[in-house]
Structures are given as C-alpha cells and as structure tokens.
Image (cartoon, helix red, strand yellow):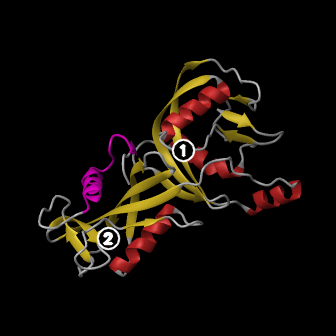
Amino acid sequence: MLQQTDATTLTPIYSSLEPDVLPADTLARAFREQTGLYVLPVRLTGMYYDGRGDELIFCFRCTMRGGDLAIPEGQPPAGFFDAQPLPRGLAAPYRQPAGDTLHHKGGPVYLSSIEEGVGARLGRLLSGRTRTAPSAPEWEVTVAVVASVVAALGDAVAWVRDRPGEPWRLPAGRVARGEAPWETIRRRLLPALGWYGGSETLNGVYLAAGRPALTLVFAVTLRDVPPPNENLHLAAPGDEMEVYDPQAQIQAINAREFLPRTLFHLAAGE
C-alpha cells in the first residue's frame, strides 16, 4: 500500500508521533484517516535514522482488518502495488525500509541509517524539490543500554556511575542531534569500558507521559569482559548487594528475555 505524493513519487503511509500515543496506534489511525482502511500493525520490523531531517522512523508489518479503500478529500491517491520488484516510483529513502520489512521473518528489529544516493540528491537538486519534514513536536530521545557479558560469575550486566557513592545505573545518554541512537550507545559505553565491541538489539521503547520524550532500551552483548573499576560494576540485575536505580533495574530484568512480547510501553515517569 503506497501513496502518490506527486506525479512521480510513491511513499508508504506514515504519520508523525504524538505524546502519549503508541506508534502502532498512530500508524493504524493514519491508515484509517488517509485511506479508509483498518489495519493492525503486528510487528516492528525496523528502526531507521534519517540524518537529512534528523528523524527516527519505525517501520511495521501490518495486516488488514477491514474497511474499503476510499481516499478522503484532500488526501493523496493510494493503492496496492506489486512488491517484487519494488515500484520504480517508490522514493529512495523508503526503498531499504520497504525491502527489509517485506523480508523480515521475525526476531530482532533491523537497525540502520538511511543514506541518500548521489542519483537521488542530483535528481532533487535538478527538480528544485526539497524535503520538508512533517509538522511535529521536537522529540527528546534517550538511550539506555543493558550491556551483558558472560564472565566467570555468569551472565553479568554492566552498571555505571559518574562518581563513587552514587547509585549504579545502566549506561544511558541523550541522543544528540545528527546522531543515530546506536552511535549514542558507542559514545556512552566507550568512556566506561575503554573500548566497545558488541551487537545491539532493540529491546524496548518507553514513551514518557504527557511530553514528547522516549527512551530506547537496547540489549548489547559484549564480546570481551571489561575490567571493573570504581565507576563500572558487573553484576546480575537481581543482585541486592548493590544500590541500583529502580527503573534501570526493571529494564535490565526485562532485557534478559531476548525479545519481550511488546516493545512499546507508556511510562508514567522518566
């Protein structure tokens, strides 16, 4: 299902996120309002960072629930297209996400940055078209990392603190403008570990209550055991010998199960 946004360009159905609304609900409403169709987003397949507009994009596989294709007045034309091969008019930024989504068989979410090819940039310059982001609030995005390692004491999680005496917390940091979330992971872990080597899996997305802010929780498996120091501690999430940040402890326990049943949560606090 694609929309025709101009004489030559096709795009998927999409909508900007709103505070207190889960992404799957936002997408289902967008389909209903823009096409008259009722869909159920059944699986998050990919999260993509588009550096041209500093945008984070969630992509879903959906199933039809009902409704009739009836484009409301003021909405662009839309219809179903053959998926193999992808339609030539599909806009370049959406080709990789569309291909990933069609081939996603379940399991970890694809994490990737969208790169604009030379041909696409040249075509945009020659046509005079510029990409404009949809009107949306500026979102505050934070990354929290559950970094686990198989050590002599078993499966351990890396906890950090800025100075001795503070509670142990999961490595976390604000995603900077122009930075993909997985780049934030590496930037945040490097000072604590002195190196970084690991594979990232998106484990949870927590939306803050009443404001445009979300926390992305990643499970990271470290390939080597870091040497503990006064600001780096290796322990199981249920270890009661140490003082942990309560919310971080919950997230760490959840992340020990490879993929929870749902990735998205409305959080009452930070």
In the image, is residue 2 above or below residue 203? above
Quick check: can you spot residue 72?
A: yes
Q: In the image shown, does 152 or 194 lie closer to the viewer? A: 194
| Mark 1 and mark 2 residues within 8 Å of each other at the beta carbon | no
Q: What stretch of residues is rendered in magenta?
A: 245-266
Residue 196 seen in the current view: no
Q: How many residues crowd around disc 1 within 10 Å: few (fewer than 14), some, or many (20 or more)?
A: many
Q: Mark 1 points at which residue?
A: 59
Q: Does the magenta stretch include residue 256?
A: yes
Where does residue 123 sit, x and y in percent of width and height? 82, 56
Please name the residue shown 77% across and 60% down the image: 121
Kindly identify the residue that appears in the image at 32 percent across and 44 percent down: 260
> Of tags 1 and 2, which is closer to the observer?
1
Quadrant location, the N terminus: top right
| Magenta-drawn stretch contains 252 | yes
Q: From this view, report whether residue 184 is shown above or below residue 208.
A: below
Q: What element carries label 2?
A: loop
Q: Is residue 92 left or right of residue 158?
A: right
The residue labelled by disc 2 is 223
Position of residue 254 in the picture relative to residue 6 (left or right): left
Q: What residue type is disc 1 on?
A: Cys
